[in-house]
Amino acid sequence: MPPPNPPPAVMQDVARAAGVHQTTVSRALRNDPRIPDATRRRIQRIAARLNYRPHPLVSALIAVRRSRRRPDFPVTLAFLAQVSRQGHDYQPHQYTYEAHLAGAQAAAAEQGYQVQLFPLNSPGMTEQRLNEILFARNVPGIIVGALPEARGQFALDWRRYCTVVIEYTFTTPKLDRVVHDSYAGMRRIMAECHGRGLRRVGLLLTGGGDERTEYLNAAAFWIEQKAGRRFAAIPPLILADWDGAAFARWHRRHRPQVVVTSNALLPDLEGWCGRAGCRIGRDLGVANVNTAASGAMAGIYQDPFTIGATAARMVIEKIGRNDRGVPDLRHTILTSGRWVEGSSLGRLARRAGRSRAG
């Protein structure tokens, strides 16, 4: 049998290895200015090497006892995300990260925790620096927000943290995650088209966007298209980036009644329709796999607020079990979106219904 795991290091172990008193260790780990910089850094390196893990609740209790008043000391969870530097201009990735963060903060507050944003792309931020900051602040849990690239990864000392990833974009290591059920979402879109008598449905995605969902959107589209021959055999158009000429050729050849797409290509598609005199909702139906909660665009609202809240609750549960590090078997929680009835399909559907009846 394998040898049992050694017990976690305690502050006394760090003090013994550093040759100092426990009080010095405590102050060094809190970045107390009374401890010289060289001594503080040496003690922090020893603590990291010994895998010392201060318990955040105990640290909060000590802080309360030292204070003359009774402040609120919520335990901090870290939300890691790449933040757009383009202000609040519409960015699909930026919007989703903000909604995920808001959901995580609301759910954590219900259980006495707080969630703080740590931008991965802030000036001077490195993996080592981030690891040091999280360790110094006694952060026990991490939520990794959706990353802009399909195969994102970075290295932290994951053994220290209870971690949950949002969406499929963080690939290494294989941490527990919360994701929208993209497969079910695409099937719902196809069902809505079928119920309206729309048989010529095409799929328009970027290669990176398709990969971001582990190809589940395309897989569900193919299954729905082939099942019972309910839809015309229109091949998906997968582009590296928007290509107006390629889309025009595809549209001219296959004449889709509906184009199913995502936020990455939707603005370009709308621009093409405007230049071509093709009216969305009348001449061409459009459905978005990640649409807004309300508005003209039909499709699936993925409810990023609920995704973020679910991730926070999952991290807190892992903290309660002291379930840190990379799991032997990754757990994936799927969240359901909801259909948004927008005008981008409505008028087209009524016209299709009249032609079918005739």
Image: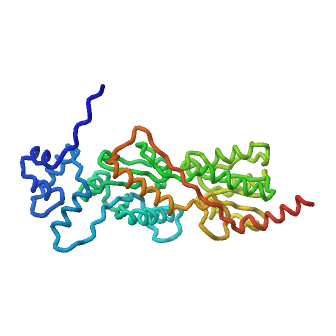
Q: Nearer the viewer, residue 67 or 247?
A: 67
Q: Nearer the viewer, residue 273 or 306?
A: 306
Where in the figure is residue 303, as x and y percent of width and height? 55, 62
From this view, report whether residue 231 is shown above or below residue 136.
above
Q: Residue at x 40, y 55 (%)?
A: 143
In the picture as drawn, the residue positioned furthest to the top comes out as 1
Seen from this angle, which residue lies furthest bottom?
A: 69
Give me the residue at 48% from left, 47% from top.
Answer: 151
Give the quarter of the figure containing the C terminus: bottom right
Answer with left or right where residue 26 lies relative to residue 271. left
- The reply, left or right, for residue 285 in relation to residue 155 is right
Residue at 34% of width from left, 64% of height from top? 112
Picture coordinates of residue 33, whole percent (x, y): 13, 64
- Quadrant where the N terminus is found in the figure: top left
In percent of width and height, residue 235 lies at 72, 46
Residue 101 x %, y %: 44, 63
Q: Is residue 293 left or right of residue 315?
A: right
Compare residues 235 and 166 and report the one nearer the observer: 166
Q: Would you identify the image quadrant in which residue 29 lies? A: bottom left
Q: Is residue 216 above or below residue 256?
A: above
